[in-house]
Image (spheres, grey):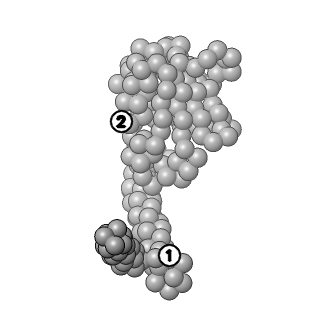
Amino acid sequence: MRQLPIRGLNHLIQGETWAQERLRQHSGARLLVEAGWIRITLTIDEHGFFMGSDSAAPPDVTLTLPTASAVGALFEREKLFGAVKLGGSAEVAESLAFVFRNLKWDAEGDLAGIVGDIPARRLVMFGQTAIARIQQGIAKATENIAEYAVEDSRLLASDKDLSAFGKEVNSLRDDLACLEMRISRL
């Protein structure tokens, strides 16, 4: 199970000589990837690829992903990178961050080798459209739930109601201050 993400990552690196060079500089460095209950220990080999590691030695870098980030990665890559926490050796962490931010998967190229150029292009276009529609659906559902919670069920207060309440509290505070001044004059 843990070999699949390593193979996928190495497949991406294999197509990018700049990534191999950048990682080769840190040959032997250990990386711990934590995502909730999942913990994968990796080592960078002499060719700039990742390999699984069962070493008990402490990692040079720890990469911590929030538990919800795996789903988020499918839709918003930049949001994922913003949520990842890197700890440990600054030099290795900086190189890893640079490589991960700039690696791009050429899904169309990989598919073309299996099904041909035209079907690969169409499959990628279909996938992009499907992801866009899923994102729109999630946004619309979120908007509808928020509208229901505020307008229909009154579970949450609307911005207008909160603003009016704030004004009433401020008015009551001012009136109380005036009353206190009157009482102190007596």
How far apart marks 2 and 1 lie (CA) works out to: 42 Å
Q: Quadrant of the C terminus?
A: bottom left
Q: Nearer the viewer, residue 185 or 66?
A: 185
Q: Quadrant of the N terminus?
A: top right
Residue 22 x %, y %: 38, 21
Q: Residue furthest front?
A: 186
With respect to residue 73, does 130 lie above or below? below
- The residue sitting at 48% across, 49% down in the picture is 73
- The residue sitting at 54% across, 53% down in the picture is 71
Q: Earlier in the sequence, mark 2 or mark 1?
A: 2
Residues at discs 2 and 1 in contact (Cβ within 8 Å): no
- The residue sitting at 31% across, 70% down in the picture is 185
Q: Nearer the viewer, residue 28 or 56?
A: 56
Q: Can residue 3 be seen from the camera position used here?
A: no
Residue 141 x %, y %: 48, 73
Q: Give the residue pinned by disc 1.
A: 156
With respect to residue 67, does 136 lie above or below? below
- The residue sitting at 40% across, 18% down in the picture is 91
Amino acid type of the residue tagged 1 in the rendering? Leu
Q: Give the residue pinned by disc 2.
A: 102
